[in-house]
């Protein structure tokens, strides 16, 4: 059984496959296509017609994007349709409905009814607990997933699975989803289970398979990686203006969690990644910060200038 806040239901990868494999015809086939497109692209229901406009298609390096101003936030969304690292099957669905949006903005209720019927046919009967608040009073009730699923679930599924399975960060996702900042995505991120966070961390570290031998690396700079790690560990969601030494101090607050969940070897690899591209003095300073985090007594060396260079 899973507990979710109101309107925050997302499908797992397995549940998404059940929808994909469901054979239906007519109106249900159309609803299935549009819901899958939402799960693959993360757009709001009211932006469906904009995403499907051929005039909004742009192509960069062979990747096709639907670029449009969202109706709710008036923010530009850059939605990839055939990126092989996301959901390239979105392009096939897009081509079937380009310039022929099957729903108007006022038909969301009919669309939701069809989605729930699809979910029931697919056997999406996982029990979830919905928590709602009215004033100071909170209430909970248990429902089946197919009873709670809606058009918003497609968007939430995309955000959750993009983080869980694709390794995307909130700072990247907002350019796809049309959020004005990362706050809403951070809220989704904090709902992920501990195992999901470990999966995301492994993707960020590019853990090799046992038979492979290659240097463990990250495509992020040390500061970007540290900020991502601080967000993932739930220390703070607002870290854009925090320097690397301060980020390391924040990470040290979670050193027990890191070591218990990922092991001391992974902790050492995190230290290594944060030192990529730094001079020797700065690396020594980072080593000292991590040693302090582990409870070792060390002599602090290095100058204030070296700390400033880490920013």
Image (cartoon, rainbow, N blue to C red):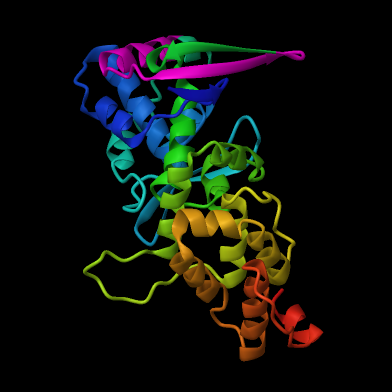
Where, by quadrant of the figure, is residue 12 drawn?
Answer: top left
Q: Position of residue 54 (x, y in %)?
A: 41, 39
| Magenta-highlighted residues | 110-137
Whether residue 104 can be seen here: no
| Residue drawn at x 53%, y 26% as measured from the top left | 8
Relative to 45, residue 249 above or below:
below
Q: Position of residue 143 (x, y in %)?
A: 45, 12
In the image, is 157 to the left or to the right of 72? left
Image quadrant for the N terminus?
top left
Q: Nearer the viewer, residue 58 or 253?
A: 253
Q: Position of residue 185 (x, y in %)?
A: 58, 41
Relative to 293, residue 133 above or below:
above
| Residue drawn at x 50%, y 71% as measured from the top left | 268
Where, by quadrant of the figure, is residue 23 drawn?
Answer: top left
In the image, is 211 to the left or to the right of 239? left
Relative to 240, residue 189 above or below:
above
Residue 55 among magenta residues: no
Q: Nearer the viewer, residue 84 or 17?
A: 17
Q: In the orientation shown, which residue stands out farthest toward the right?
A: 304
Q: Nearer the viewer, residue 84 or 26?
A: 84
| Residue drawn at x 39%, y 64% as measured from the top left | 206
In the image, is 251 to the left or to the right of 216? right
Whether residue 186 can be seen here: yes
Where, by quadrant of the figure, is residue 130 drawn?
Answer: top right
Q: Nearer the viewer, residue 238 or 114?
A: 238
Q: Position of residue 281 (x, y in %)?
A: 66, 89
Residue 133 among magenta residues: yes
| Count of all numbered marks drawn on residues in the image | 0
| Residue drawn at x 61%, y 90% as measured from the top left | 280
């Amino acid at each position: 059984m899973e507990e979710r806040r109101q309107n925050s239901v997302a499908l797992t990868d397995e549940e998404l496959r059940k929808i994909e494999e469901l054979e239906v015809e007519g109106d249900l086939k159309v609803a299935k296509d549009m819901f899958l497109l939402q799960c693959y692209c993360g757009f709001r229901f009211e932006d469906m017609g904009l995403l499907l406009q051929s005039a909004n298609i742009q192509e960069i390096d062979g990747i096709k994007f639907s670029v449009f101003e969202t109706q709710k936030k008036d923010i530009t969304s850059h939605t990839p349709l055939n990126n092989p690292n996301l959901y390239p099957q979105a392009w096939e669905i897009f081509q079937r409905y380009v310039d022929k949006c099957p729903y108007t903005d006022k038909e969301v209720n009919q669309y939701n009814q069809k989605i729930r019927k699809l979910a029931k046919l697919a056997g999406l009967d996982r029990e979830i607990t919905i928590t709602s608040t009215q004033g100071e009073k909170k209430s909970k009730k248990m429902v089946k997933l197919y009873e709670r699923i809606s058009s918003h679930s497609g968007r939430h599924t995309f955000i959750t699975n993009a983080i869980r399975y694709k390794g995307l960060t909130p700072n990247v996702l907002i350019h796809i989803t049309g959020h004005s900042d990362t706050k809403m995505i951070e809220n989704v991120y904090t709902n992920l289970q501990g195992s999901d966070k470990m999966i995301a961390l492994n993707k960020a570290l590019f853990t090799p398979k046992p038979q492979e031998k290659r240097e463990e690396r990250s495509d992020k700079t040390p500061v970007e990686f540290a900020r991502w790690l601080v967000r993932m560990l739930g220390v703070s969601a607002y870290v854009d203006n925090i320097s690397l030494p301060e980020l390391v101090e924040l990470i040290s607050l979670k050193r027990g969690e890191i070591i218990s969940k990922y092991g001391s070897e992974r902790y050492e690899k995190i230290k290594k990644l944060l030192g990529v591209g730094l001079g020797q003095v700065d690396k020594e300073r980072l080593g000292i910060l991590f040693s302090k985090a582990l409870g070792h007594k060390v002599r602090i060396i290095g100058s204030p200038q070296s700390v400033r260079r880490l920013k």
